[in-house]
Image (cartoon, rainbow, N blue to C red):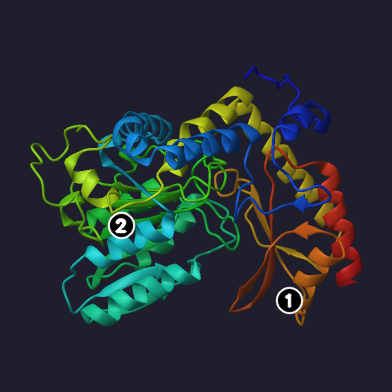
Amino acid sequence: MSDIVTDNANSDAQWRQARAQMLLAPGVANLNTGSFGPLPRAVFERVTTLRQLLAEEPMDFLIRQAPPLLWEARERLGRFLGADPRRLIFTANVSASVNMVASALRLAAPGEVLLTDHEYGAMHWCWERVAVRQGLTLRTFPLPVMAETPEEIVDAVIAALSERTRVLFFSHVLSPTGLVLPAREICAAARRRGVLTVIDGAHAPAMVPQVDLDKMDCDFYGGNCHKWLLAPTGSGFLYMGNEARDRLQPLQVSWGWHHDRGHPDQRDDYGSTPRLRQFEFEGTRDPCPWLAVPAALDFQTALGWESIRRRNQHLVANVRARLADLTVLRLETPSHAGLHRFMTAYRLPVGTDAPKLRRDLWERYRIEAPIVDRPDGHLIRVSTHFYNTTQEIDHLATALAELLT
């Protein structure tokens, strides 16, 4: 695919060709890549081709064709994430990745699992179960969500850590507000105190410019490829830090578990390593979403990663400018360039009927933008990727003005 982007990344007209290569429902303003990314046509065609091969001759595909494709996908994703491919386990999604870690760790009790107060609800429940099973305390601490500098975030983490903390779990990018945490600095602070770090990186790949997992020095990092990377549903990963990887055990024992492994981190004939295979081979499964990750990388590489970022920064600025006119909304995502990317959240007025607003945005305006329930009220979160248009942002602003005033 040829590069279709001109130097002016701020004009919707320059991105019509890119948008035309996406599978988008006609008449829908999809402002929710933060939940699910739509597929580029090239990625859909690739995963469909792979699934046809799997359907036609499963044995040939799974035994002969898939292994080299799996290793290629692992190497490509590893280069993109700044990660040693021998430390990358393919999973279905970040929830599967975090559950794999949480179920395997054996932590010294008494003690605590420490989370920020903005973690994804299902992941909070995951660690709640760990605490109950292992006789630990689950504790949350407040983040300064409208911080003006990354140092404010790091200071809040350091203040929350204690001698009782066994694991620190946090999101690289907060799902409710889009706040980007300084993950590398947080991991360094935790490591100095002997605390394991487990990171929910659901939103980071392809949104945070340089994830650099090998340099982050975390213990475990789970991520999704089906959001900003625009890979098929069912493509996620778990990264294992060098020192913590021996603490991990698979949730399911299958044929990857007990065989002549040789060196645990040496590439094998299955597209993995003996260590990785025990996690990825859970029995018969469809690996096609994993194998299509290179197609997703190719698609955005052809558009130009830096051009995409400039485009997305332009769209974020447009969101902030248009919604600033609605005085009933309050910005809940920091303005510091290092603390936000392409998700922008707003506090909704007190007393907003959230279920009705969700219905009206979809049924009356065909807008996909999640209403987030928080203990202190409701937020609306706007995700803007390169395929979005300023007209869609205008449509959202008009809808909210009519529904909230």
262, 122: nearer the viewer: 262
- Kind of element beneath mark 1: helix
Q: Earlier in the sequence, mark 2 or mark 1?
A: 2
Quadrant containing the C terminus is bottom right
Residue designated by label 2: 197
Instruction: Estimate the x, y position of residue 360 in percent, counting from the top left.
Output: 83, 70
Q: Is residue 391 left or right of residue 46?
A: right
Residue 112: quarter of image:
bottom left
Rendered residue at 48%/57% (across/down): 152
Instruction: Estimate the x, y position of residue 299 in percent, counting from the top left.
Output: 58, 29
Q: Is residue 161 left or right of residue 154?
A: left
Instruction: Estimate the x, y position of residue 254 in percent, counting from the top left.
Output: 21, 55
Q: Is residue 133 visible?
A: yes
Q: Amino acid at mark 1?
A: Ala
The reply to whether discs 2 and 1 touch (Cβ–Cβ < 8 Å) is no
The residue carrying pointer 1 sits among few (fewer than 14), some (14 to 19) or many (20 or more) residues within 10 Å by Cα, namely some
Residue designated by label 1: 354
Which residue is the extreme one toward the front?
56
- Kind of element beneath mark 2: strand
